Image (tube, rainbow, N blue to C red):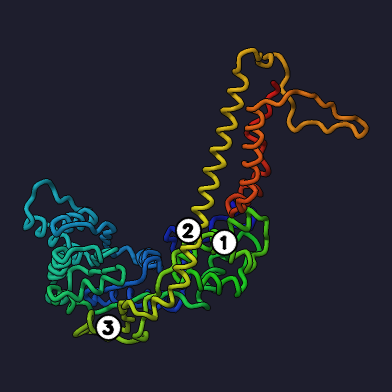
Amino acid sequence: MYERFYNLRERPFSLSPDPEYLYPSRVHREALGYLRYGIEGHAGFVVITGEIGCGKTTLLQTMLRSLDRQTSVSRLVNTMLDARELIEAVMLDFGLDPGQGRSKPYLLRDLAQFLVDQRIAGRLALLVIDEAQNLSPAALEEVRMLSNLETEKSKLIQILLVGQPNLREVLARPELEQLRQRVTVSYHIEPLDMDDTAAYVNHRLRRAAIGAPLEFSRGVTDLIHQRSEGVPRKINVIADAILLFGYGEERRVIDVNLVKEVVEELGSIGVLSTRAVRPNPTPAGVSVPVLDPAPLVDVPAAAIALPSTTAASRAATAPHDRELQQRETQLAERERRFAEQQRVVMEGYRLLRQTRDEPGRSAPPSSAPRPAWPPAKPAPDAKPAVAVTAPRASDAVLQSQSHRMFRDSSLAPEGFWTRLRRNLFGAGKPIFEDWRV
């Protein structure tokens, strides 16, 4: 919609995980480095975690694109599977036919034979499990058993687990001790800081630009960082809404006032929610003992600590809760006014129909031309003709209802989408036209 207005070949802040738009921030460069080390070094289990929307899938797509043709990849994105379904899904993604009603030992035999053939051909077998936090303990134990397929020198299959921070909590269970000991590379992707947020936004704008790229000022990107908490997916949502609103207002330059208005509107409709930021007391560069109790390689990773509800956190979120409650009250009042306006319009329409259908009154002839819209202005010297008629009770009620309708409608504030629709399509013609009785 706004691409031509801002000289863009496509939407730069689309939510699809496009590797071409990956910004190589510090955390993403480190994560890619650990991924490549774990895969090329046959390091056993590799675990990558990160907050929702931090760019794990985009990072994974970039890594898979960089693999050579000597790698056979089985990637699972739907992890709501039990242990047997997990084996069948791995076989199907490797191109094997699990068959119908075959027992589990036969499935494991065929899978092991496939992995041996891949090793003889000099190929690497890689199993990538996305959203691994949804796997049950039994399915995770089945994944560990797959890692037992090995030769005297190395593993026959390399396993990569990617998931949200609670994946670490799942792996910390006592019954998964054996799996934990096999994790040799682990890394947590942190949100972007202010500098990386500014570079991330303008990087995507440059990638999508046709000519001279649009650039967001540092004040704009700092405000985006504040409301997005440095999460790339939230940054994309806010930046895309800013471009859409700027196009509706025909603003070539994006300023802070425009961003404030857009962010406030996104918060009022529930797109942006305020939540407590998860603390991260462990500095980067420290190994996580939960995942690496006896690591083969000392890999730096950032630990995730679950926040506890304290009086300080409640006091910090109290203003946001009050603001949210006020906005809910305003929305309820707008809905009430809209319902009242709709009721008044329908009542006026009903009275108009009742007046036209009264006995003794004739409907306007069908051949009579309807008045043109908008009505022509009278000549400067012409005196308006006044028709003196006796007032009717129904006309008085209709007039009072109409005055009330326009009085109430003038109180309703003009919202974001109303202004956007007005700027895009202009003022519309009234719905109900006057009838001449």
| Point 86% across, 31% down: residue | 378
How far apart are the two marked residues, 2 and 1, measured between alpha carbons? 18 Å
| Residue labelled with disc 2 | 328
| Residue labelled with disc 3 | 288
Q: Are marks 2 and 1 in contact (CB under 8 Å)?
A: no
Q: Viewer-nearest of labels 2 and 1?
A: 2
Position of residue 226 measured from the top left corner of the image (x, y, whole percent): 51, 73
How far apart are the two marked residues, 1 and 3, measured between alpha carbons? 40 Å
First along the sequence among labels 2 and 1: 1
At label 2, counting other C-alpha atoms closer than 10 Å, the crowd grade (few under 14, some 14-19, many 20 or more) is: some
Q: Quadrant of the C terminus?
A: top right
109 and 214: which one is in front? 214
First along the sequence among labels 2 and 3: 3
How far apart are the two marked residues, 2 and 3, measured between alpha carbons? 43 Å
Whether residue 123 can be seen here: no
| Residue labelled with disc 1 | 262
At label 1, counting other C-alpha atoms closer than 10 Å, the crowd grade (few under 14, some 14-19, many 20 or more) is: many
